[in-house]
């Protein structure tokens, strides 16, 4: 039978099991949209291509499966770039299909022509320029394989308009659905034995987990290993949210805004079992002082991570969850009494920083309240700033929910569209987006998408009328020379949300907010809560720039 290039793309996406696509149409991808018109795949019309790409990210991050986004050529394509870079840094499997001007016009500065392949080479796992309709039969399945195999990541496919319209005979459709295991080296019994031996020798081991472990969604092995051999677990920002904060062996998040006790505990460990982490600078602090007393075993699916920042004593290339599964049976039970006692001592020396409500509501207390009122398996998204770090520090994650945040690129504007994507892919779950007033404004147009879809997304705005994290840095490290960090206008966000068609409430004063929050969370559909936050609050403790993690500043 004869199909157009556009019909081939849609058919192949159907064969891969795609049910929802986010995007925005334009002149160069209208044939693709026309083919989508005849498909059962649902299209979600975002209001900005960055929003559309973060919606795809929200679907991919919350399911672990690849998600698709469509954009037109030129400005449509350039609008996806930030969210694409964000997906690359956090290893998120999304596939962006951009329309391109017709092949004969490429290179002529045609209307809405941009060389998106050159622009995105360094921020994708691979970018395909399609030159004929029949190539799509191999490129589309290959894009799924690339996006999901080994270390996941984004792929871009640029399809000229004439290729979308070109006819091609297809007798047999390719069968392969995405296969997440390709390119992963098998884990040898020697590697497992070497790690097990290191654990047996160690007196003060730590299981250090990052985004690579969270992505596997198999947290049970880490819990089993931890409880069997009594090895405390510490996470990076990207590894946080999968273990209950009530687990006595979970020491929470380390790094720049991690717990002071945890950073000091890591400094005393003699074996760091680093699973699915990339030793980012926010996590390590001054590298030469990062776990300098420990043997480092690094397990990562991406061989290029070997020794990139920290030289490991042993590097194992493989899927973190597979290694954990094998280790669970290899290690012996252990009490580790003296290490556990030492950890308790350090925790006493550096008790958790818990400010009181001092005439205003402190976010840490709000987060506790919201967390207790929310569903245990709620999906939490954040934007970027102080609110993001407060959520990481104080939201009482139960271990059955998910924490979706922009870790590597730290992109303001992530939270709302990512929450929409997570809610689309998980309609039965509650989704809460914590945002700051600066970040929310960067993709606020997606409130229109949310209102249209009536998804179960609650937006909690920590409103300090400023770029809080910037102000904090200016206060701490630039002699309080405040420039470009305070907003002069005071926006009425609840009225704005209502204008988009979303119910909202203002929380003010320091009493009665518990019930108000509960009421909003219990409602069906989207809702917005505006919470005034004192502008001088700081996220503490904090590792100052250039310092070691154990040199944190902030009240004990
Ligand atoms: C797109 C983008 N631009 C700039 C920054 C730098 N930046 C980091 S945090 C921050 C302030 C965020 O303000 P807000 O969203 O209001 O959150 P708050 O810190 O007040 O909680 C800025 C400007 C960024 N991370 N992303």
Image (cartoon, rainbow, N blue to C red):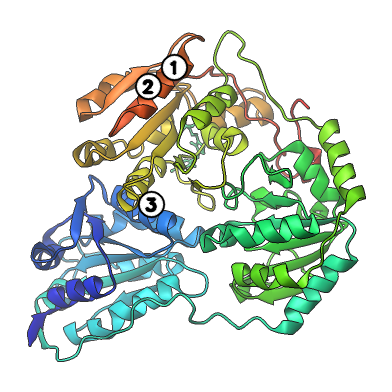
Front label number (3 vs 2)? 2
Q: Is residue 464 above or below residue 262?
A: above
Q: Is residue 154 above or below residue 234?
A: below
| Viewer-proximal residue among 3 and 72 | 3
| Viewer-proximal residue among 143 and 89 | 143
Instruction: List the residue tagged with mark 1.
Output: 515
How far, Cα to Cα, is label 2 from label 1?
A: 6 Å
Q: Indicate yes or no: mark 1 CB to ligand 1 under 8 Å.
A: no
Specify the label residue 30 is tagged with: none
Q: Is residue 347 something that shows in the picture?
A: yes
Instruction: List the residue tagged with mark 3.
Output: 58
Q: Indicate yes or no: mark 3 CB to ligand 1 under 8 Å.
A: no
Q: Position of residue 449 (x, y in %)?
A: 23, 41
Is label 3 in a helix, a strand or a loop? Answer: helix
**Residue 341 falls in image quadrant:** top right
Left or right: 470, with 203 as reference point: left
Q: Is residue 351 above or below residue 17?
A: above
First of labels 3, 1 by sequence position: 3
How far, Cα to Cα, is label 3 from label 1?
A: 29 Å
Instruction: List the residue tagged with mark 2.
Output: 519
Is label 2 in a helix, a strand or a loop? Answer: helix
Q: Are marks 2 and 1 in contact (CB under 8 Å)?
A: yes
Q: Indicate yes or no: mark 2 CB to ligand 1 under 8 Å.
A: no
Q: Position of residue 530 (x, y in %)?
A: 39, 22
Left or right: 82, with 70 as reference point: right
Left or right: 548, with 280 as reference point: right
């Amino acid at each position: 039978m004869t199909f157009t290039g556009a019909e081939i793309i849609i058919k192949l996406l159907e064969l891969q099991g795609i049910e929802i696509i986010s995007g925005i149409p334009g002149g160069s991808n209208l044939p693709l949209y026309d083919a989508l018109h005849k498909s059962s795949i649902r299209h979600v019309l975002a209001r900005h291509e960055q929003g559309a790409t973060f919606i795809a990210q929200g679907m991919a991050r919350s399911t672990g499966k690849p998600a698709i986004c469509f954009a037109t050529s030129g400005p449509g394509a350039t609008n996806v770039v930030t969210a694409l870079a964000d997906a690359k840094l956090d290893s998120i499997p999304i596939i962006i299909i951009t329309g391109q001007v017709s092949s004969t016009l490429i290179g002529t500065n045609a209307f809405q022509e941009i060389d998106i392949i050159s622009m995105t080479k360094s921020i994708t796992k691979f970018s395909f320029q399609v030159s004929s309709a029949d190539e799509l039969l191999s490129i589309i399945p290959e894009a799924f394989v690339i996006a999901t195999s080994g270390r996941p990541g984004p792929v871009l496919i640029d399809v000229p308009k004439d290729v979308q319209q070109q006819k091609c005979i297809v007798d047999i459709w390719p069968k392969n659905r995405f296969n997440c295991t390709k390119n992963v080296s098998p884990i040898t019994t020697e590697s497992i034995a070497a790690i097990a031996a290191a654990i047996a020798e160690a007196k003060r081991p730590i299981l250090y987990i990052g985004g690579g472990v969270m992505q596997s969604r198999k947290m049970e092995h880490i819990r089993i290993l931890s409880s069997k051999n009594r090895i405390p677990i510490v996470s990076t920002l990207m590894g946080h949210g999968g273990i209950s904060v009530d687990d006595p062996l979970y020491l929470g998040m380390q790094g720049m805004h991690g717990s002071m006790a945890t950073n000091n505990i890591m400094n005393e460990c003699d074996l760091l079992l680093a699973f699915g982490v990339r030793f980012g600078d926010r996590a390590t602090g001054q590298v030469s002082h990062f776990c300098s007393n420990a043997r480092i075993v690094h397990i990562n699916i991406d061989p290029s991570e070997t020794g990139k920042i920290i030289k490991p004593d042993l590097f194992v290339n493989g899927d973190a969850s597979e290694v954990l599964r094998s280790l669970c049976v290899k290690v012996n039970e252990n009490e580790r009494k003296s290490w556990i006692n030492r950890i308790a001592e350090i925790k006493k020396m550096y008790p958790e920083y818990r400010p009181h409500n001092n005439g205003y509501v402190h976010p840490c207390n709000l987060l506790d309240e919201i967390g207790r009122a929310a569903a245990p398996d709620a999906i939490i998204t954040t934007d970027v700033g102080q609110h993001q770090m407060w959520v990481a520090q104080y939201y009482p994650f139960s271990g059955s929910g998910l924490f979706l945040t922009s870790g590597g690129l730290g992109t303001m504007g992530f939270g709302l569209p990512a929450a929409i994507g997570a809610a689309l892919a998980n309609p039965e779950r509650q989704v809460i987006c914590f945002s700051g007033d600066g970040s929310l404004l960067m993709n606020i147009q997606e409130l229109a998408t949310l209102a249209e879809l009536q998804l179960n997304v609650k937006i909690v705005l920590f409103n300090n009328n400023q770029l809080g994290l910037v102000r904090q840095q200016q206060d701490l490290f630039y002699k309080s020379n405040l420039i470009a960090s305070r907003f002069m206008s005071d926006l009425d966000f609840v009225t704005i949300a209502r204008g988009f068609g979303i119910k909202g409430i203002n929380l003010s004063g320091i009493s009665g907010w518990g019930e108000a929050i509960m009421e909003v969370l219990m409602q069906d559909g989207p809702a917005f809560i505006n919470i005034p936050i004192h502008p001088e609050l700081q996220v503490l403790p904090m590792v100052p720039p250039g310092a070691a993690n154990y040199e944190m500043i902030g009240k004990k």
